Image: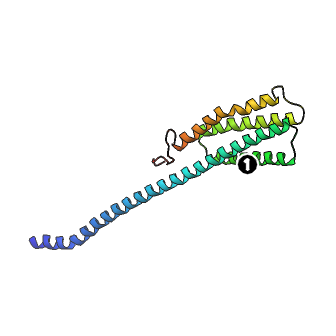
């Protein structure tokens, strides 16, 4: 009987050893897979964060440029100094703003998009008011001073938009620009 147990043990030892080794390899593979997946998620989150951040910077910059060009154009309308160059500069800023806004519509969070929608609508309204004034048929609230005041009121909306962007990027109230460390 002892010999049977000895022979059986000898014969089963490699099988049990192999099975134990296979379980260890599977567990090690699973750990490596989870670590690789976690690394991929961190890298993906970082790439998405950087894309969203770049989009917000470009959108903020394009909207600011458009607003400034509108103000310059409004002054040129008042002085009757509008020429093809002035029109071209305004249209370039307007189209750059539209392109940046279109990209932001695909990247921005809902709170940021709400703010961007408001600003885009306001810029469009200011553009229309300015063009109507230029063409000699201003709107009832479309005098030079009223349009200038309207463009001046953007700063509060701008702060709200910038705050929504910073909140979305996780940088509100901080001096740094590092992304949140969550896994997405």
Q: Nearer the viewer, residue 112 or 89?
A: 89
- The residue carrying mark 1 is 96
Q: Could you tell me which secondary element the residue under label 1 belongs to?
A: helix
Q: Picture coordinates of residue 21 (x, y %)?
A: 29, 67
Q: Residue furthest right?
A: 136
Looking at the image, residue 41 sits to the left or right of residue 18; the answer is right
Q: Quadrant of residue 1?
A: bottom left
Which residue appears at 58% of the width and 48% of the height?
53
Q: In the picture provided, is 53 more to the left or to the right than 117?
A: left
- In percent of width and height, residue 144 lies at 81, 31
Side of 71 relative to 108 (left or right)? right
Locate residue 125: give its quadrant: top right
Residue 178: image location, x then y, percent:
49, 48
Q: Is residue 110 visible?
A: no
Which color scheme is applied? rainbow
Which residue is at 21% across, 70% downward?
A: 13
Exactly how many numbered labels are in the figure? 1
Residue 66 position within the rendered picture, expressed as x and y whole percent measured from the top left: 73, 43
Please, which residue is most extreme toward the front here?
Answer: 79
Residue 178 higher or lower than 12, as above or below: above
The residue depicted at 46 percent of the width and 49 percent of the height is: 183
Residue, x 69% and y 31% (percent of image)?
Answer: 153
Q: Residue furthest top?
A: 140
**Viewer can see residue 162:** yes
Q: Nearer the viewer, residue 14 or 172?
A: 172
Is 83 situated left or right of 27 in this image? Answer: right
Residue 67 occupies quadrant? top right
Mark 1 surroundings within 10 Å by alpha-carbon count, few (fewer than 14), some (14 through 19), many (20 or more): some
């Amino acid at each position: 009987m002892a010999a049977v147990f000895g022979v059986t043990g000898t014969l089963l030892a490699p099988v049990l050893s192999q099975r134990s080794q296979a379980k260890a390899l599977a567990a090690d593979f699973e750990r490596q897979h989870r670590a690789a997946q976690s690394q991929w998620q961190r890298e993906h989150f970082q790439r998405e964060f950087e894309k969203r951040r770049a989009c917000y910077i470009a959108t903020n910059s394009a909207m600011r440029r458009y607003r400034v060009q509108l103000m310059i154009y409004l002054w040129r309308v008042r002085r009757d100094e509008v020429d093809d160059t002035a029109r071209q500069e305004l249209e370039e800023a307007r189209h750059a703003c539209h392109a940046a806004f279109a990209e932001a519509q695909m990247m921005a969070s809902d709170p940021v998009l709400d703010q961007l929608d408001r600003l885009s609508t306001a810029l469009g309204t200011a553009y229309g008011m300015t063009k109507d004034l230029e063409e000699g048929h201003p709107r009832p609230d479309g005098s030079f001073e009223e349009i200038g005041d309207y463009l001046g009121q953007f700063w509060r909306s701008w702060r709200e938009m910038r705050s929504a962007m910073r909140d979305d990027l996780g940088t509100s109230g901080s001096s740094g620009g590092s992304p949140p460390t969550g896994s997405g």
